[in-house]
Image: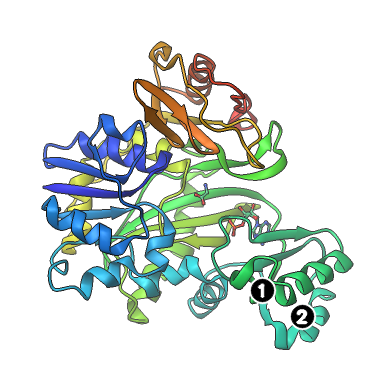
Amino acid sequence: MNILILGSGGRESAFAWKLAQSPKCSQLFIAPGNAGTGQYGTNLNVKVNDFEGIKQAVLNNKIDLVLVGPEEPLVKGIHDFFLADDLLRGVPVIGPQREGAQLEGSKDFSKQFMERNDIPAAASKTFTRETMQEGFEYLATIGLPIVLKADGLAAGKGVLICMSVVEAQQELIEMLTEAKFGEASSKVVVEQFLQGIELSVFVLSDGNNYKVLPSAKDYKRIGEGDTGLNTGGMGSVSPVPFASGEFLQKVEQRVIIPTINGLKQEGIPYKGFIFIGLMNCGGDPYMIEYNCRMGDPETESVMMRIESDLVDLLQGVAEGTLDEKELVISDKVAATVVMVAGGYPGEYLKDKTITGMENVRDSQVFHAGTYLDGEDVKTSGGRVLAITSLQDNMFDALQQATADASRIYYDGMYFRKDIGFDLL
Ligand code: AMP
Ligand code: GLY
């Protein structure tokens, strides 16, 4: 079958790498892709939110299945767009329809969904400009620190952790009345702070059946020792050593099963990945967030550990036969080190030539913000490359990925050398 992946990051590179290995994949296309995805398939110059352009690409290239990488086209209704079009209706889309994508697209929707379905999560309330006064009163009651979340998509920047009630009040005013995060903060979820260690669990669902994919931990801060500004993600490891079998059982019973059942009971169709962001609070799982897609850079580590044919699994999602499919997960450990541009996550350097990729010894080099300029591979994004290594144990995986990252060079290059070492 011919497959189209939408997106251009490290996540989509890892999907492309994995799908291209399947004997069921005849032709693979990536829109728009990057300098690396061209190794696995054909890049198409179409943006992920250009639905008409995607339609033409699907028809021109006789695409049989579309895998959506990022959240934005899902929240904007790409799946609904396919279902409403006579020519596209028969082409399955992996990724939920607009309503299911609200699990990520609206924090208020997702908190209410958790509440209705008895899924453990931090206590919270949602406020608007009209109810800001009640918001102030609530802030004073929930204890410090206080978490404020813009309701809508805010490119990963819409969560604030405030250390005082005064700071939280000020931020609430800016979010609700000064559109600090634009339309996304016209509603704000005020939430209790959860103390614990964070991890992500990934589920693939056909709307009825599900498979639990490998769990992973990502590292969000720019600086070593988890310091400095938040980023899209500086590295990941899978599996997560502190997520024991017993803990993952609790996640399945308390979170995954109620989520799948809740979607079914509420009549919300869901074919795609569910990213479950969790806090392990003293051995019990509490929800932080849902995302309606895979994580980046978690996907890079997760894909390396899936031994089964991903095309076969995605076909199961499309056809509603996921229960008949096999999911084999490697016992090995995958570690990903993300190489970023100088200045990231602030203003960052671009158009720098990348060298040394041929010296990498035992890791996959997944491209993210790269493009081809003649023969040269150059940087275009904040996150440039994800270096993923699969080894027998965590120490070797971390060391190999880190060593291989250091074999690559571009002006302003930076990566964290401590990814995962806190878990050893
Ligand atoms: P989100 O955009 O929902 O992923 O939130 C960004 C980050 O904020 C999360 O990855 C957590 O590290 C942190 N966070 C969000 N909600 C909470 C919470 N209730 N308690 C503690 N940390 C939180
Ligand atoms: N790594 C976190 C995310 O993809 O949202």
Disc on the earlier residue, 2 or 1: 2
Residue at the image point whose x is 30% and y is 63% from the top: 51
- Identify the element where label 1 is drawn: strand
The reply to whether the residue tagged 2 has its Cβ within 8 angstroms of ligand 1 is: no
User: Which amino acid does the dot numbered 1 rest on?
Assistant: Val
Give the vertical position of 217 relative to 6 (above or below): above
* Residue pointed to by mark 1: 188
- Identify the element where label 2 is drawn: helix
- Asked if one can make out residue 388 in the rendered structure from this viewpoint, the answer is no
Residue 164: quadrant of the picture: bottom right
* Residue pointed to by mark 2: 135
Q: Residues within 10 Å of mark 2 (few under 14, many from 20)?
A: many
Residue 171: quadrant of the picture: bottom right
Give the vertical position of 348 relative to 191 (above or below): above
Q: How many labels does the image show?
A: 2
Badge 2 vs badge 1, beta-carbon distance below 8 Å: yes
Give the vertical position of 407 relative to 109 (above or below): above
Q: Which of 295 and 184 is in front in this view?
A: 184
x and y percentages locating residue 233 in the rendered image? 56, 42
User: Which amino acid does the dot numbered 2 rest on?
Assistant: Gly
x and y percentages locating residue 380 in the rendered image? 49, 36
